[in-house]
Image (tube, helix red, strand yellow):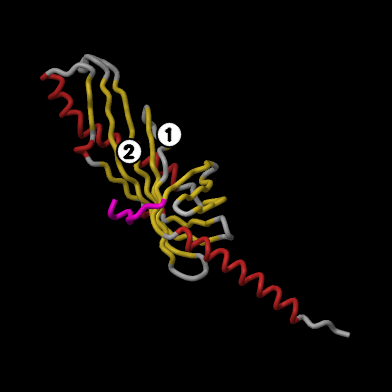
Amino acid sequence: MKKSILPVLAMGAALMLASCDSRQKLSEELQGVWAGTPEQLTNSGAARATMVRMMEFSSTGDAGEGNVTLAAYITVENTMPANDSIVTPLTISASGTATITGLYQAKDDDDLLLNLDASSLAVNVDPDGVELSYDILSGESGSHLAALKPAAAMLASQQIEHAARNVFFNLSEIEDIKVNNNMLKCEMGHKDLTFRRQSAGMAAQ
């Protein structure tokens, strides 16, 4: 006597539906903009570097998929030792923003797969925001600072882009996602991170 396969098929369909629902639920919970907390960076090439992450998720369907924009607000500090031209050590600090876009797909109820477009990486450093400071400032050193600014801005841009590439280009998954109201905890690149939901999109930041 042959057993009907209908119950087996029905059970399989129910499991698939439940899985799809859990993925879509995660996608819906992530909608909007999230801001992280300051992190120390050790691979930027700068003497000191910090980063604050931003994430924006926008659903494009009902199966847990959508568009994602990741941003990193990075500050770098460099120290130039005293030499024949600089009478005291010079501190150079600059900040910039790196952004990258791509697609996301919920893997299950707490993991997200990312497909980031490397060609979309954009780095912006405001030359006017580059700060150079001597311990002792004179009229002569002040004019010297102005001459150093373009090179300092270029160095900062290179360091910020280097840091952003290290952060973004190896990122293919966000794991162990837990959303509690306006708080998001997850693991990215073997680091436990915390984000807070923001009230406006990144473009308005």
Of 104 and 122, nearer the camera is: 104
Q: Residue at x 38, y 35 (%)?
A: 50
Q: In the rendered view, would you say 61 is above or below 84?
A: below
- Look at the numbered disc 2 and give the secondary structure of its residue: helix
Q: Residue at x 75, y 76 (%)?
A: 8
Which residue is farthest right? Answer: 1
The residue carrying pointer 1 sits among few (fewer than 14), some (14 to 19) or many (20 or more) residues within 10 Å by Cα, namely few
Classify residue 90 as left or right of residue 30: left
Amino acid bearing label 1? Gln
Q: Which range of residues does the magenta coloring cover? A: 197-205
Reply yes or no: does residue 204 show up in magenta. Answer: yes
Q: Mark 2 points at which residue?
A: 158
- Look at the numbered disc 1 and give the secondary structure of its residue: strand
Reply yes or no: does residue 7 show up in magenta. Answer: no
Q: Select label 2 or label 1 by which is in front.
A: 1
Image-quadrant location for residue 91: top left
- Image coordinates for residue 99, horizontal then vertical, percent: 35, 50
Q: Mark 1 points at which residue?
A: 40
Q: In the rendered view, would you say 80 is above or below 5?
A: above
Q: Distance between the residues labelled 2 and 1?
A: 18 Å
Q: Residue at x 57, y 60 (%)?
A: 107
The quadrant the N terminus occupies is bottom right
Amino acid bearing label 2? Gln
Q: In the rendered view, would you say 112 is above or below 146?
A: below
Classify residue 34 as left or right of residue 109: left
- Image coordinates for residue 144, horizontal then vertical, percent: 16, 24
- Image coordinates for residue 29, horizontal then vertical, percent: 48, 60
Image-quadrant location for residue 10: bottom right
